[in-house]
Amino acid sequence: MTATAAATNLASGEPPINFAAHQFRAGNMAGARDDFEQMLAMLIQAVHPGARAIAANPGDWGIDILLGELSGLVVIWQSKYFWPAVTRSAQAQIRESFDSALSAAKRNGYELSQWILCVPSSMDPATAQWWDRWQERRQRATGVAIELWHETTLRNLLAKPDVSHVRRHFYDPYVPAQVPRTPLRDLDPGAATDLDRALFVRQLRAAGHTEFHAAKREFFNAELLAREIADKRVVAELSALGEADGLVHSIWEARFNAACQQEPVDVRLPGLHAGVMREIRETTAFPAALPAGPVHRCGLMHRVVQDRRAGWVVRWREIAAEGAP
């Protein structure tokens, strides 16, 4: 989600919509796909009364959400939880889903008039070009209207008053309550120098970064926060810290995997660090019991890197292993 979109939603009194919330609700990508599809079913039914979800038993005839009767003309919505972007790796799935819906219609005696792909993200330039060409070609060959509902389309629909119950049900629970934040501490020059040898700094340096002071301050404050929580032993805060750790790691993993699917893959994965940190700062999914602000949250990501569980280049595991005990 962009900073502009988040600011607009906050100014309107509504929490920003982050489609990564489906991962945090479900705990994994498989669950996120199901949760996203459930959201779509409620949203589409609110916008198009009479629309209904179709269960897979064992197959779903290429239908996730249906409008119309399976004895005449139908409109089909296909849910695909591609995250954090729709890249080249998704093209085969899109083709197969459309072909499956078309074949099922012919096999079972109804006519497909429109097929709508719903995704919670946007397409990268190469995939957007592929989609435009594929959409035109397949519409012309089959007579079926093909449409794309991407993240902006979905946010615009979720902003409508008539679907506010859908927005509240799936996204409002992830707006953290206002809790006192742990004050930020300055990093003295000596401690900053000591952190030059830290693994999270070496990982940033490998990715081509040349300035590290902000990252060091983020890490330093996250470390202090974690120690204070450990010392106090408040169960809710300990649980929130563990949840936040899993959240930032999940955000990194999704974006790292997407970056590695680009062709050709740049070994430095440019933009990965900036994208991960932007999502960490903007997400509304952090547990409410965690007294952390954006600096602490970004620092939690540096702690994951410091723990040898993530990195910013393709060969991050090799860098993590250097000097390991």
Image (tube, grey):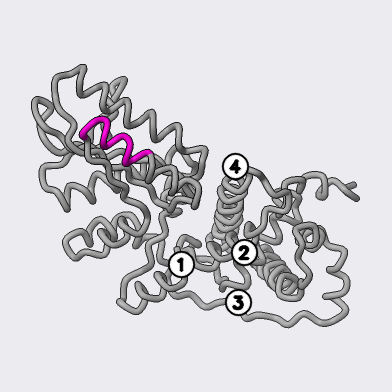
- The answer to whether residue 136 is magenta is yes
Of the pair 318 and 105, the residue shown nearer to us: 105
Q: In this rendering, would 130 be left or right of 294?
A: left
Please give the residue where the numbered disc 3 appears in the rendered image.
Answer: 182
Task: Report the Cα–Cα distance between label 1 and label 4.
Answer: 22 Å
Residues drawn in magenta: 134-143
Q: Which of the two discs, 2 and 3, labels the residue nearer the N terminus?
A: 3
- Which callout, 1 or 4, points to the residue nearer the camera? 4
Please give the residue where the numbered disc 1 appears in the rendered image.
Answer: 2
Q: Are marks 1 and 3 in contact (CB under 8 Å)?
A: no
Q: Label 2: how many residues lie within 10 Å, few (<14), some (14-19) or many (20+)?
A: few
Label 2 amino acid?
A: Ala
Task: Report the Cα–Cα distance between label 4 and label 2.
Answer: 18 Å
Residue at 22% over, 40% down: 145
Please give the residue where the numbered disc 4 appears in the rendered image.
Answer: 261
Please give the residue where the numbered disc 2 appears in the rendered image.
Answer: 274
Secondary-structure class at tag 3: loop
- Which callout, 2 or 3, points to the residue nearer the camera? 2
Residue at 56% over, 73% down: 293
User: Residue 131's quadrant in the figure?
Assistant: top left
